[in-house]
């Protein structure tokens, strides 16, 4: 059974997770906060605490994951935090994915974050070429895109 990890499993992540569940996927969703974990579990998705600003907390969760979804196009934080989230933190996760079972990476390339999304999308394209990881950076992430990738 394919398993997806949705990093940033807020409202849109829970909808996406539900669509993947309906397609027969096992789905794990992350949140930094307890109330987020409760909402994830309420949607029938396995909750996991992780902070994408700390890549190790995400990487600890990918041992049985085939698809990683970086759904942070509307993340909230300071400009510096958002630049790091869609820059250095994202790059660190992608560098380490080659050592994991993850074989699909999906990056949300649209949202309220703004210009850091362009940087993130370029990081994803470069990583996909370098490490041959099937990756996409659509403006809207759909379950069908994840299922077809790779």
Image: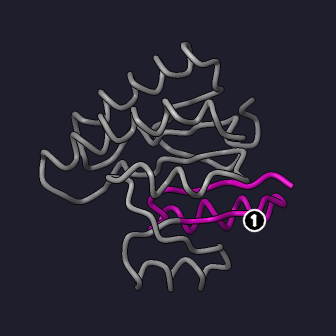
* Image location of residue 62, percent across then percent down: 63, 51
In front: 75, or 64? Answer: 64
* Image location of residue 58, percent across then percent down: 49, 54
> Which color scheme did the rendering employ for the protein?
one colour
17 displayed left or right of 69: right
> Which residue lies most toward the left here?
79
The image quadrant where one finds the N terminus is bottom right
Residue 20 highlighted magenta (yes or no): yes
Q: Which residues are magenta?
A: 1-29
* Image location of residue 150, percent across then percent down: 75, 29
Circle 1 packing at 10 Å, graded few (<14), some (14-19), many (20+), is: some
Q: Secondary structure at mark 1?
A: helix
Q: Which residue is mark 1?
A: 21
Tell me which residue sits at (31%, 28%) in the image: 118
* Image location of residue 87, percent across then percent down: 30, 34
Tell me which residue sits at (55%, 46%) in the image: 141
In front: 73, or 31? Answer: 31
> Which quadrant would residue 23 be assigned to in this image?
bottom right
In front: 88, or 2? Answer: 88
> Which residue lies most toward the top here?
129
Tell me which residue sits at (58%, 36%) in the image: 97
Q: Is residue 30 above or below residue 43?
A: above
Tell me which residue sits at (64%, 18%) in the image: 132
Residue 39 highlighted magenta (yes or no): no
149 displayed left or right of 41: right
In this figure, what is the number of numbered marks? 1
């Amino acid at each position: 059974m394919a398993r997806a990890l949705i990093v940033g499993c807020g409202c849109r992540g829970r909808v996406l997770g539900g669509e993947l569940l309906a397609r027969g996927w096992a789905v794990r969703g992350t949140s930094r906060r307890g109330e987020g974990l409760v909402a994830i579990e309420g949607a029938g998705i396995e909750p996991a605490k992780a902070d994408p600003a700390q890549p190790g907390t995400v990487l600890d969760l990918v041992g049985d994951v085939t698809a990683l979804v970086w759904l942070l196009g509307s993340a909230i934080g300071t400009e510096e935090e958002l630049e790091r989230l869609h820059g250095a933190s994202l790059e660190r996760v992608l560098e380490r994915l080659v050592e994991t079972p993850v074989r699909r990476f999906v990056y949300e390339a649209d949202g309220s974050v703004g210009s850091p999304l362009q940087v993130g999308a370029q990081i994803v394209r470069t990583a996909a070429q370098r490490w041959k990881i099937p990756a996409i950076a659509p403006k809207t992430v759909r379950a069908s895109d994840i299922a077809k990738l790779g």
